[in-house]
Image (cartoon, helix red, strand yellow):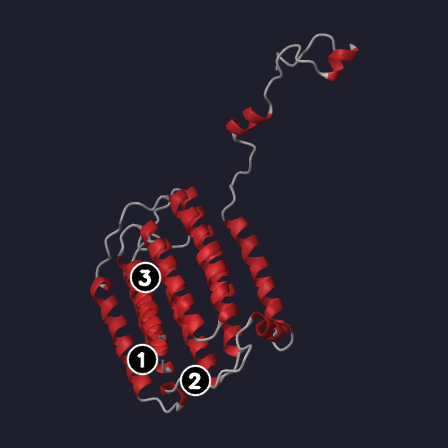
Amino acid sequence: MSAVLFFIAAIGAIAGAIGVVVLRNPFYSVLALVSHLISLAALFLLLRAEFVAAGQVVVYAGAVMVLYVFVVAYVGGGEDLPTGGGLRILGPVFALALAVELCIALLGTGLKGISQKGAPYVAGFGSPEAIGKELLTKFLFPFEVASLLLLVAAIGAVVLARRRKGLEGDDEFLKTVHTPRSLFTGTMAEGVGVRTAPRGGED
Amino acid sequence: MAIGWYLVVSAMIFCIGVAGVLTRRNPMVILLCLELMLNAGNLALVAFSRMHGNQDGQVFALIVMVVAACEVTVGLGLIVALYRRRLPIDVDELNELHG
């Protein structure tokens, strides 16, 4: 049963990865990446990493991909660029060479555990409780550094993508903010007679 | 399934990501391919964590996910800044820094 699930998830992950690279429209590439991430979460579940799988689905396939979809919709990115010059042939050749090299490394490895199903399963392995305990005791410093990194990235993105000139020169925005008030629409000042002739219509 | 199978899948995903980074010209797709490579690394980390029966690898994978999210945020901010300044969204055209 687990072998069947493994092959389904692995084929889904690899097909999604190929889809990201091959599809011409960036929007479809993002959708292929979502399917890839969900298949990968299934693989994580098979490896008994429940918390990582949940984080993968919620954070990656949910939040990060929504960000991608927003930017693709904003920028457009519709025109498909042809692959440039020499890298068109060299790129896949290099990737294939890397794949062959990695397979040789895997076949010639001296690791004993690689051909087994892994260490015996103990209850609670990879559960949110266990991972949380690790994060807050043994890995507390990396955890805090990660939160600082997220803060830096958020500020950096805002600084990078802001409007360069600010809001002063934007006529459209000024018009919406300073709409002249129509005559005798019942302000408090008119009611008590402080401002008799409404000046709002003139400016 | 033996752990080796997961490592084979991870290696294949990594190589597909490398091919994408080398061949595509749209920076958004290059970011997606970087995600593929990071995810391949994550899969290998979780597989080794299962092999040793030790959860440290899963914590590593979580930290890698955080770093990937940061990289995506900054990369997409750059792409939006490029779009605002009417620069071509093409890594072959963007080959010099203007300050």
Point 22% across, 62% down: residue: A88
Badges 2 and 1, same chain: yes
In percent of width and height, residue A84 lies at: 24, 57
Which comes before the other along the chain, label 3 or label 2? 3
Mark 2 or 1, closer to the camera: 2
Q: Amino acid at mark 1?
A: Leu
Asked if badge 3 and badge 2 are on a common chain, one would say: yes
Asked whether disc 3 touches disc 2, contact meaning CB atoms under 8 Å apart, the reply is: no
The secondary structure type at the circle numbered 2 is loop
Q: CA distance from mark 3 to mark 2?
A: 27 Å
* Residue under numbered circle 3: A16
Q: Is residue B95 visible?
A: no
Q: Which residue is more in the foreground, A165 or A71?
A: A71
Q: CA distance from mark 1 to mark 3?
A: 21 Å
Q: Residue at x 26, y 49 (%)?
A: A80
Q: How far apart are the two marked residues, 2 and 1, measured between alpha carbons?
A: 21 Å
- The chain ID associated with circle 3 is A
Identify the disc placed on residue A102: 1
Q: Quadrant of residue A104?
A: bottom left
- Residue A16 is drawn in which quadrant? bottom left
What residue is drawn where x is 32% and y is 52%? A28
Closer to the N terminus: mark 1 or mark 3? 3
